[in-house]
Image (spheres, helix red, strand yellow):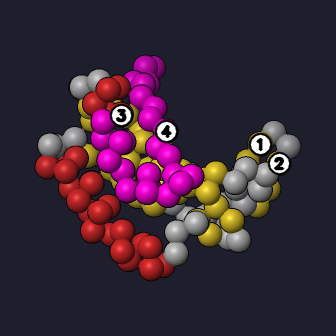
């Protein structure tokens, strides 16, 4: 079984993600259902939302905040186990973030780190 990271993206602006507190409250049962379905299969490894604020570290130094020129931001992640990329994509297709017109899920396989 392989591990995949699902990067949950949405449009950001004005120091917050596009979702309103009411959207978050209304959507919480959908998120619990979605993650619960993956967990009941024994395939949920980890999932968390991430803060809008952050810093970017580059060879030019440290700058505050995510890239301001990019409107689409990573809002959270989910790491799951799946037998194939297709199964990870199937998990993604029912993600509640897709209700937003600019919501998306990027699916990336986590590779084993060989020393």
Query: Which of the two marks, 1 or 4, is nearer to us in this view?
Result: 4
Q: Which residue occupies 85% across, 43% down? A: 60
Whichever of callouts 4 and 2 sits on the residue coming sooner in the sequence is 2
Look at the numbered discs 3 and 2 and tell me whether their residues touch, using CB distance below 8 Å.
no
Look at the numbered discs 1 and 2 and tell me whether their residues touch, using CB distance below 8 Å.
yes
Q: Which residue occupies 52% across, 69% down? A: 19
Q: Is 16 part of what is drawn in magenta?
A: no
Q: CA distance from mark 1 to mark 2?
A: 5 Å
Instruction: Name the element at disc 3.
Output: helix
77 with respect to 102 (left or right):
left
Q: Which residue occupies 19% across, 50% down? A: 37
The 10 Å Cα crowd at callout 2, few under 14, some 14 to 19, many 20 or more, is few
On the image, numbered disc 1 is attached to which residue? 58
Whichever of callouts 4 and 3 sits on the residue coming sooner in the sequence is 3
Look at the numbered discs 1 and 4 and tell me whether their residues touch, using CB distance below 8 Å.
no
Instruction: Name the element at disc 2.
Output: strand
Whether residue 79 is visible:
no
Q: Quadrant where the N terminus lies?
A: top left
On the image, numbered disc 3 is attached to which residue? 89
Q: Position of residue 33 (x, y in %)?
A: 23, 59
Q: Which segment is the magenta one? A: 90-115
The 10 Å Cα crowd at callout 1, few under 14, some 14 to 19, many 20 or more, is few
26 with respect to 81 (left or right):
right
In front of the other: 2 or 16? 16
On the image, numbered disc 2 is attached to which residue? 61
Q: CA distance from mark 1 to mark 4?
A: 23 Å
Considering only vertical position in the picture, is 31 above or below 74? below
Q: CA distance from mark 3 to mark 2?
A: 36 Å
Whichever of callouts 1 and 4 sits on the residue coming sooner in the sequence is 1
On the image, numbered disc 4 is attached to which residue? 106
Q: Position of residue 54 (x, y in %)?
A: 66, 60
Q: CA distance from mark 4 to mark 3?
A: 9 Å
């Amino acid at each position: 079984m392989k591990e995949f990271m699902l990067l949950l993206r949405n449009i950001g602006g004005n120091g917050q993600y596009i979702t309103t507190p009411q959207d978050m409250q209304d959507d919480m049962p959908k998120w619990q259902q979605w993650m619960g379905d993956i967990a009941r299969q024994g395939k949920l490894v980890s999932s968390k939302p991430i803060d809008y604020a952050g810093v970017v570290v580059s060879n030019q130094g440290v700058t505050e905040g995510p890239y301001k020129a990019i409107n689409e931001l990573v809002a959270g992640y989910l790491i799951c186990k799946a037998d194939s990329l297709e199964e990870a994509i199937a998990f993604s297709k029912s993600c509640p973030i897709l209700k937003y017109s600019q919501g998306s899920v990027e699916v990336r396989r986590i590779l084993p780190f060989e020393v």
